[in-house]
Amino acid sequence: MNITIVGTGYVGLVTGACFSEWGHNVMCVDNDQRKVDMLHRMEMPIYEDGLEALVRRNVEAGRLHFSNSIKEGTAFAEVIFIAVGTPPGYRGAANLSYVEQVGREVAENMDGYRLLVEKSTVPVNTGEQLKRTMSKYMKADIPFDIASNPEFLKEGTAIEDAFDPDRIVVGVESERAAQLMREIYEPIIQKTNCAFLVMNIASAELTKHASNSFLATKISFINAVSRVCELTGANVEQVAQGMGLDRRIGPKFLNAGVGYGGSCFPKDVDAFVQIADNLGYDFELLKTVQRVNKTQREHVMQMIQRELWVVQDKEVAILGLAFKPGTDDIRESPSLYFVPQLIEAGAKLRLWDPVAEQNFAERFPDQRYTKTPMEALEGADLLLVLTEWPEVKALEPEAMKKVMRCPVVVDGRNVFDPKVMHDQGFSYTSIGRPGIAV
Ligand code: UDX
């Protein structure tokens, strides 16, 4: 089947590459000529584990193509996915101008039936708006359908997730659209036997916001529990384990830390609060989730201040700039909160990240970046851990202590064992865990 994907960001490129791997003919369209040129040279505009090999294989097999033209994309396929950005706009609501633009251009260029699928995360009822836009801009009365097919891919494991989905959610209004969507996903349904849920468009749109907001709630919940743990001597990891073994709760997304970041959770929770507000419902629960996430960072900043007393001129090593391991993405990363705060307080920073350094250096070009985590630690008065990269987990406390000026660690991701750190003579603060593990 021929499929066009508009947008070659994390969602669009991964989705397009996976569809082509399943045997479909895919055209990925982006209006950013630089990205299209890079893809033609087999350079990936984003870092995602396994993506380059997947793209290369399918381009060589003649199943994956790139273009800068929506017109060409509209001619290429009956089904067109919209995977363009929906950045936060006015008062946290998603900016839908790119989505609208794709709808308009498809409408102006289509010469027969088309199914336009929302893949980007959009507010509930965007499908309705897209339908109106299509009707308005179409040159003749041509039949079309709108569908919603939210993505649940996690950065860093996006390809794995696409090949082994928990479920596929599809919102449609016609049998024809449902059939086409089923045909696209048939190879993976056959292989994994995953659930294929067909519902109305508004329900599919809401499923995405509700899922991400629920996961963010789980994180804020465990972070709030970690605060109580710190006040009582309880260990949040043990509490999370005790909770997570209840199958109704489940063990995932119960890691306490510096709070959630990334391109999805902060934006989606903001947008969901805003959508509810606009509809006349005050989603207080999610407002608290946002507040807990914000105060968690402030709380870790206080830990740093307590340890250093005077921050001015202190050498602070920061390990991890990406919002989580396995990605070069720094959008809404906790590092974007801590680095400016520490610079303003007069600290001298040494920053390390295995893949996000370049993205970060574009925003903070004057900072010192190191090649290895150990190099960042040399002469440091304090280590702040912000991303649980395997290279950080693998550090030997004994070796760390030798190179640091003061053995002080604020561990925002609970990567080290408190007892080992204590035995090595570190002043070690982590999230929701007593100094010495029980
Ligand atoms: C998320 C959703 O998981 C995915 O389904 C959706 O399609 C896009 O948004 P992603 O943003 O890639 O995926 O990251 P995810 O792995 O969910 O982590 C989000 C943030 O939560 C990260 O900052 C991570 O460090 C944090 N997190 C996650 C915690 O602090 N604790 C946890 O237990 C889990």
Image: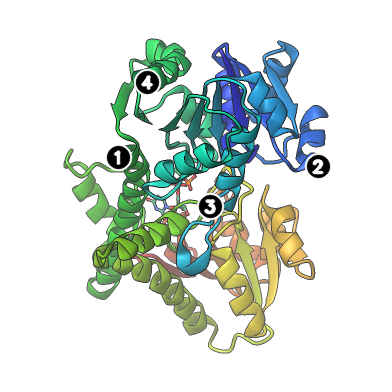
Image depth: mark 3 or mark 2 in front: 3
Per the model, the C-alpha gap separating discs 3 and 1 is 19 Å
Task: Look at mark 1 in the image and give the residue it sits on.
Answer: 203
Q: Is mark 2 within 8 Å of ligand 1?
A: no
Could you say which disc has been placed on residue 142 in the image?
Answer: none
Per the model, the C-alpha gap separating discs 1 and 4 is 15 Å
In front: 336, or 169?
A: 169
Q: Earlier in the sequence, mark 3 or mark 4?
A: 3
* Number of residues whose C-alpha sits closer than 10 Å to that of mark 2, classed few (under 14), some (14–19) or many (20 or more): few
- Labels 3 and 2 touching (C-beta < 8 A): no
- Labels 1 and 4 touching (C-beta < 8 A): no
Could you say which disc has been placed on residue 34 in the image?
Answer: 2
Disc 1 residue type (three-letter): Ser
- 382 left or right, relative to 417: right
- 87 left or right, relative to 277: right
Image depth: mark 1 or mark 2 in front: 1
Q: Secondary structure at mark 4?
A: helix
Does residue 312 sit above or below 149 in this rendering?
below
Q: Earlier in the sequence, mark 2 or mark 4?
A: 2
Per the model, the C-alpha gap separating discs 3 and 2 is 23 Å
Q: Position of residue 75 (x, y in %)?
A: 67, 22
Image depth: mark 2 or mark 4 in front: 4
- Labels 2 and 4 touching (C-beta < 8 A): no
Q: Quadrant of the C terminus?
A: bottom left
Q: Position of residue 157 (x, y in %)?
A: 51, 35
Could you say which disc has been placed on residue 96 in the image?
Answer: 3
- Labels 3 and 1 touching (C-beta < 8 A): no
Task: Look at mark 4 in the image and give the residue it sits on.
Answer: 178
Q: Position of residue 195 (x, y in %)?
A: 30, 22
Q: Earlier in the sequence, mark 1 or mark 2?
A: 2
* Number of residues whose C-alpha sits closer than 10 Å to that of mark 3, classed few (under 14), some (14–19) or many (20 or more): some
